[in-house]
Every structure is written in C-alpha cells, then in structure tokens.
Amino acid sequence: MHGVRGELKLESYTEPRTQIFRYRPWLLRSASGDRQIDGGRGRAHGKGLVAELPGVVDRDAAAALVGTEVWVARSALPALKPGEYYWSDLEGLEVVTVEGVPLGRVSHLLATGANDVLVAKDGERERLIPFLVDRFVTGVDMEQQRITVDWDPEF
C-alpha cells in the first residue's frame, strides 16, 4: 500500500518498468481468485511504481490486494524482433554445450545490470551463464526446445 487514497506499490518486470501501464487489460491473480481490470494508471515513485486501480479508493481496498500478481495477455506484448526472447519462453529449455554435453534446464534468468544471466539447473547443481548471444549463447532453438552454449561443463 502507498497512501490513504488506495494507491498500491507495484513491482514491474517490464523494460522499462513503467511499460506495464501501457498493457491492457490486466489480470489480477490472488488466492481469492482472478479478476480482469482495465484502466489501471500509475507512475514511477523512487525505485518502484505506484498504481491506481479502478474501484480501489481507500487503504482497506488496497490492503485487500497485497500479494496480488498482475498478469497481461501475451497478445498485449510487443512483437519480438529476430534474436529476442521473452524470459518465460526460455524457462524450461534444455541447455547443452556446443559439444552436446547436457547442463540441465533453464530454471530462470536474472537481470544483473551488465547483462542477463541464464540459470541452468541440473538436480542440485546450478550454472550461471551470461546470456550473451554469439559469445556464450551460440544458439536458441525454440522448435527443439534447446539452448546451445559455449561453456565449460566443469565450471
């Protein structure tokens, strides 16, 4: 919660983070169920975002939304250029070296500021591989559900 008018603090994974306010409609997902809203507005505030949602006009209504996730339909997202990927499309893909040695599957990706990092997990072992195309990531084959990397399997 942010204020007495029902404003909410919001964390966005869009780039730039304020891009979330351009997507419509939003699907609000919480333990009490899903509901679709249109017309959410907001602004940057410090290191985060502050959102105003239709029907959320006081602190109590805002408090009821704590922990709610905001989702948008894939169709609302911008079209990708060749060589671009949404992180969610990469999660779960098999990761192999250029020699064919399996390194596990993509658990998730991290934004580090300098570059994104792919986390390949094989059982308990995790490998952090910089997602630098043509340097470490030599290929992404969505049809084969595989990412090929130039990476030492012992590292």
Image (spheres, rainbow, N blue to C red):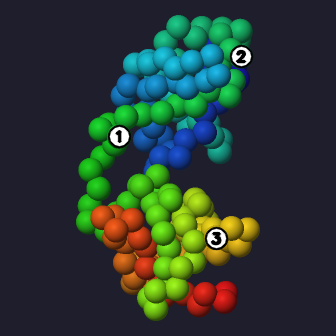
What mark, if any, has residue 74 been given in the picture? 1
As measured in the structure, the alpha-carbon distance from the residue carrying label 1 to the one carrying label 2 is: 28 Å
Residue 18: percent from the left, percent from the top?
Answer: 48, 40
- Viewed as shown, does residue 148 lie left or right of 8? left
- Labels 1 and 3: the sequence-earlier one: 1
- Viewed as shown, does residue 33 lie left or right of 100? right
Residue 146: percent from the left, percent from the top?
Answer: 41, 70
The secondary element bearing badge 3 is classed as strand
The secondary element bearing badge 1 is classed as helix
Residue 25: percent from the left, percent from the top?
Answer: 38, 25
| Closer mark to the observer between disc 1 and disc 2 | 1
| Closer mark to the observer between disc 2 and disc 3 | 3
The N terminus: image quadrant: top right
| Closer mark to the observer between disc 1 and disc 3 | 3
Residue 113 visible, this orientation: no
Q: Which residue is mark 3?
A: 122
Q: Which residue is mark 2?
A: 63
| In front of the other: 43 or 83 | 83
Please, is residue 122 above or below residue 81 in the view? below
Residue 126 visible, this orientation: yes
